[in-house]
Amino acid sequence: MRSGNSQNAQASTHAGVPFTLATGSKAPDFELPGSDGKQHSFRGKTSIQGKVGTLIFFTCNHCPYVQAIAERLARDTGALRDMGIGVAAIMSNDVAAYPEDSFDNMKVFAAAHGFA
């Protein structure tokens, strides 16, 4: 992940978190590959931002809670997009520890549950 404006970032070692933002800070830019085969960024040509707002949530394939609500999550995030809210799901797990969360498995999970 690329960090955006470093003036907005506060270094932190709380709970092993290497980087946190102060409340009210602008989100840093990032560019990540998507399960749709495209590169996505927070700003720029491939921005995930919506006209009304943006929702970024952190998820993983192996979580039983995520598995239980996957279809509803796909439906609801589709509805949010229809309202002008950009949506992105980011899987931040260690794939060595959780191989079921690999990028290839993310593509399969996204396709199986109708994530756009």
Image (tube, rainbow, N blue to C red):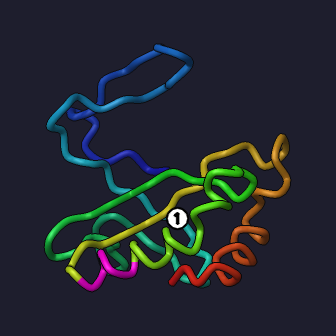
> In screen coordinates, is 18 left or right of 94?
left
Residue 48, magenta (yes or no): no
> What is the three-letter code of the residue carrying label 1?
Leu
Q: Is residue 16 left or right of residue 60?
A: left
Picture quarter containing residue 48? bottom left
Q: Residue at x 81, y 47 (%)?
A: 98
Viewed as shown, does residue 18 lie left or right of 26? right
Q: Main secondary structure of the magenta part?
A: helix
Q: Where is residue 32 shown, x and y percent of the image?
A: 52, 64
> How many labels sit on residues?
1
State the image coordinates of residue 28 (x, y, percent, origin top left).
Answer: 31, 49
- How packed mark 1 is, by other alpha carbons closer than 10 Å (few <14, some 14-19, many 20 or more), is few
Q: Horizontal placement of 98 versus 51: left or right?
A: right
Percent of width and height locating residue 69:
57, 63
Seen in the picture, residue 27 relative to 68 is either above or below; the reply is above
Magenta extent: 78-82
**Residue at x 15% of width, y 76% of height:** 51
Q: Residue 107 appears at what percent x and percent y?
A: 70, 76
What residue is at 44 percent from the left and 54 percent from the top?
57
Q: In the rendered view, tell whether residue 104 sits above or below residue 17.
A: below
Name the residue carrying label 1: 32
Q: Give 88 or 62, whichever is nearer the viewer.
A: 62
Write the residue at 49% across / 62% down. Answer: 89
